[in-house]
Image (cartoon, rainbow, N blue to C red):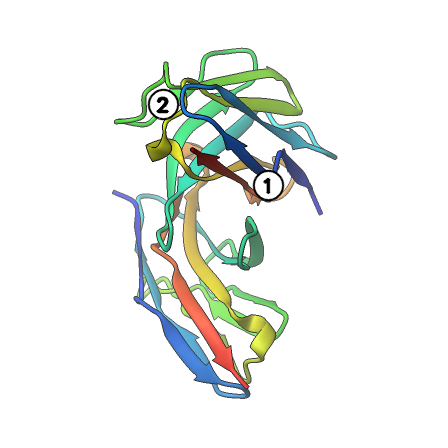
Amino acid sequence: GAVVSQHPSRVICKSGTSVKIECRSLDFQATTMFWYRQFPKQSLMLMATSNEGSKATYEQGVEKDKFLINHASLTLSTLTVTSAHPEDSSFYICSARSEANTGELFFGEGSRLTVL
Amino acid sequence: GNSVTQMEGPVTLSEEAFLTINCTYTATGYPSLFWYVQYPGEGLQLLLKATKADDKGSNKGFEATYRKETTSFHLEKGSVQVSDSAVYFCALSVYTGNQFYFGTGTSLTVIP
């Protein structure tokens, strides 16, 4: 089946620094990718929809200047957490829809961000 | 609107017990329904899906039937194993809206 790869799987950074997380669709083209945030023991919260070649669409309450999303190609979307703070520590998951599979979402492995 | 309601956990079962995790939905249009599983420290993996009413999705001994009359998609397994311990998410997709809606997840722990 379709594969989505996310990197890095774990990252620890100092407060005030920026962190970039990559999401790649390995064997299919994804015009749309989604970024989720998951708090401990909670469900996924959709942060934004990433559209190839255009600006991302952010969900209400998500700071677009804080969470920069770039979708420069049909197989790569990046999420940059700018000026990270401890409250940004979380599990970030990307997903991509495979057009050939009745709209099924394929998920990356997730990236655990810890901000010290 | 579109939403998914999932039974709250956590659920703890002994090995070989029968599992049911309830999921009901509301949707505009004709949704596809999914169960995803998340093992500790990992992302979500598709467990099974159903794209129209009365379809039954099945995988790894798990089953769920798309019931339009009761707007439900309950997950069942006849005999759980320790390796089934994970968090299970029910989800729906209204394709034209390009959006997925997830339940809150149900944590399952299977003890030997």
Q: Chain of mark 1?
A: A
- The reply to whether residue B99 is in sight is no
Q: Chain of mark 2?
A: A
Placement of B89 over or under A88, stated as above or below:
below
**Any mark on residue A29, and which?**
none
The residue lying furthest to the right in this view is: A27
Quarter of the picture holding the C terminus of chain B: bottom right
Q: Quadrant of residue A103?
A: top right
Q: Position of residue A116 (x, y in %)?
A: 42, 33
Tell me what residue is drawn at x 36 percent, y 27 percent.
Answer: A85
The one of B20 and A91 positioned closer to us in this rendering = A91
Q: Position of residue B31 (x, y in %)?
A: 41, 48
Tell me what residue is drawn at x 46 percent, y 19 percent.
Answer: A17
SS state under label 2: strand
Q: Which residue is mark 1?
A: A108
The residue lying furthest to the top in this view is: A54
Q: Quadrant of residue A16?
A: top left
The one of B96 and B82 positioned closer to us in this rendering = B82
Q: Position of residue B53 (x, y in %)?
A: 44, 60
Cα distance, mark 1 to mark 2? 19 Å
Total labels: the figure holds: 2
Q: Are marks 1 and 2 in contact (CB under 8 Å)?
A: no
Quarter of the picture holding the N terminus of chain B: top left
Tell me what residue is drawn at x 41 percent, y 49 percent.
Answer: B92
| Mark 2 nearby-residue class (10 Å; few <14, some 14–19, many ≥20) | some
Q: Which residue is mark 2?
A: A58
SS state under label 1: loop
Placement of A109 over or under B81, stated as above or below:
above
